[in-house]
Amino acid sequence: MSDKNFKYVNNLWNDSEASKLDAVARLIYRSNKLGSDQRVTNTGGGNTSAKLPETDPLTGEKTQVLWVKGSGGDLRTSTKENFSSLYQDKLISLQKVYGAAKEKGPKTPAEDNMVAMYNHTTFNLNPRASSIDTPLHSFIPFKHVDHTHPNAAISVAASENSVKLTKEIYGEEVIHTPWLRPGFELGLAMQKICQENPKAKGIMMGQHGLINWSNDDKECYFLSLELIDRAAQFIEKKYAEKGGDAKAFGGAIHETLPEATRKKVFAKLLPWLRGQVSQQKRFLGTIQDDEKILRFVNSNDAPRLAELGTSCPDHFLRTKIKPLYVPLEKISPKTDAEIDGFVAMLKTKLSDGLKKYREDYATYYNNCKRANSPAMRDPNPTVILIPGLGMVAWGKDKSESRVTAEFYNCAVEVMRGAEAIDKYIALPQQEAFDIEYWLLEEAKLQRMPAEKELARQVIVVVGAGSGIGKEVAHRLVKEGAHIVCVDLNADAAKATAKEITDKYGLGIGVAGTGISNCGPAIGLSANITDRASVRVMLDEVALAYGGFDSIAVTAGIFVAPDTTGHIPDDKWALTFSINVTGGYIVADEAAKTWKEQGLTGNLVLTTSANAVVSKKGSVAYDTSKAAANHLVRELAIELSPLVRVNGVAPATVVQGSAMFPRDRVIASLAKYNIPYTDDEATDSLTTKLAKFYADRTLTKSPITPADQAEAFFLLLTKRLSKTTGQVITVDGGLHEAFLR
């Protein structure tokens, strides 16, 4: 490890690692190290490049190629596939093309048209789309270039006296350039700065970030860290002189509510709030209530700074032009009744605030739109700030909501730094609009793949620890749903959730705190026969995602009679408690959340083919499932029109079912006189029993958890959007169960 140390950034360079890599791999290595420190650059932000000699596949001659991080991707996780490769001499030759195009018409269309020209400079048919920042890297006459979005540097760039501060911190080493939208014109401006300032090592990009260069890749990496660290040290010195945290943002005027109180308030508030911001498309939420964000939302200056909005383009593309700040009186609820009153007051404040926010956003759009601007996007806020509580960030999925939270945290740090050294200023609204509604950005959005069928949905799967429930969880997540894996066995629920996150990842971005630190799945425990346990579970779902959309109940129990064929009273009661009452309790508690959200949803209960087949040996189970069938119909009426309620009625599912442990399989084999041996493997026994049940059906095929999961999937999508109060049988064609 290099002996270079910094105070406010991490030195992650390792010579023994880097020395084993070729030139392109070293660029990726440098990029990953820079992206690994959130103080250097935010998720998806910044880019790096290297001008390297390559062999032209057509001529066989050496040529200089610009390798630069392409459109999309993240420095921390980028691989070679995330980098464009372009002929450097052809990129330089585009300057003449641009100059001629500018003479024929306005600069902006000419500049935007240059993006398509990059395709003509592609080296070796590299399919990665080039970034709009490509000219910045090409036109700077050095081999290696790093463009980052450090909070410390942006604090300087977003200060009222940015030019003076840049000079004070860096002297002649970093030159300030006023805000200019990334692209060809900015690249030319940087080329000129390099020509006129031979001592310069970097450029402070007004309202934007930092770019620096070197002819050695390791030196470029350390220069990035050194310049960022220098700005951070300057800020922290001034910050301490002004009183530090105690005086940050003009000092605190609100007290932070205790953690337990915050959780209660958020659990009651978030489903309603999710419904309010999801009027056009559904959002998922992330709570941020750590010390830094609370320091900001509780402060005297928070209303003023929040209204100014963010500065860096990367920030407001995620967080919109500004957040919604909720002004509050000094209230500290303690009892449950006071908390209920506080939540009611918050809803009123938020209703008024959301209405005003949407009006302000429409005004911003109408005042700034161009003749060819895309249609106005969703006018709801993606960041909501509440004194005493913290921040709620929204996104189309959990990963995006976490990134939104991360970006506004960056914005807060930028404001803190700018206010410490000078006065924070935001990007002018027209400039912000031209970035947010940039036609090239719109084109990028249009190129994105269509959302999956269950995208933006949070689905609670009760019984997800094994069998049908586990299969349902895996089936739904494939279609884009976020899955809450619930089971009486907490370890089993968490294991299923881990299977999902291991396969699909946790997503990107800095996670929220507590239970909000989750990805596309979480595992929770609940006893569905205990109303309080169910309520706690649903509240935890609200804290994790902001609410939920649908519930699938697959939990159930089969109690075999004793040796005399008798079902004891306690076992009878337990059977009905789990198979009938449990489903009702889940539905009844969930109804409160569905009503708060005001968003349509689905409830799917598991019944059984046994519900309509009378036979010996399963009287408690069969009658409980008959009751569950009617519960489906009753709940369909009770929860309409907001929630559709349906059931899935499996025939006997042996393979993968928690209801068929080895001893029950053996008992069933004995009951049906199917030959077996006591030392026979469990899988073999299960296969025999599954074949026996399959042979009783019309399709002659074993019934599997995957078969049931497909039925759940259909009922939880919009494919059967007019179906409610129905029970779909998945029994292979068990003619005894035909309705009559």
Image: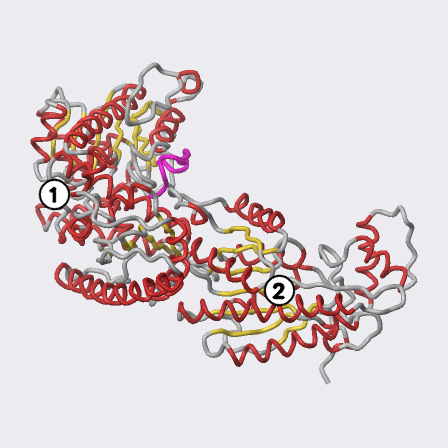
* Image side of residue 125 versus residue 95, left or right: right
User: Height in image: 182 above or below 137?
Assistant: below
User: Residue extending furthest top?
Assistant: 3
Q: Position of residue 363 (x, y in %)?
A: 15, 64
The boundaries of the magenta stretch are 72-83
- Checking the image for residue 529, the label placed there is 2
Dividing the picture into quadrants, the one containing residue 420 is top left
Q: Residue at coordinates 22% horizontally, 58% vertically from top-left?
A: 329
Drawn side of residue 671 relative to residue 441, left or right: right
In the rendered picture of this protein, how many numbered marks are placed on residues? Answer: 2
Number of the front mark, 1 or 2: 2
Tell whether position 81 is magenta: yes
Quarter location, residue 66: top left
**Image height check: is 643 above or below 520?**
below
Q: Position of residue 208 (x, y in %)?
A: 19, 39
Taking the image as shown, residue 658 lies to the left or right of residue 503, namely right
Placement of the C terminus among the 4 image quadrants: bottom right
Q: Are marks 1 and 2 in contact (CB under 8 Å)?
A: no
Estimate the spatial distance between the alpha carbons at disc 1 and disc 2, rounded to whole Å. 75 Å
Type of amino acid at the residue the image marks with label 2: Thr
Tell me if mark 2 has few (under 14), some (14-19) or many (20+) residues whose alpha carbon lies within 10 angstroms of its own: many
Most common secondary structure along the magenta stretch? loop
Residue most extreme to the bottom? 740
Residue 430 image position (x, y, % from top left):
13, 53
Residue at mark 1: 100
Q: Mark 1 or mark 2: which comes first in sequence?
A: 1
For the residue pair 740 and 446, the one nearer the viewer reads as 740
The residue lying at 48 percent from left, 61 percent from top is: 454
User: Is 45 drawn above or below residue 340 in the view shown?
Assistant: above
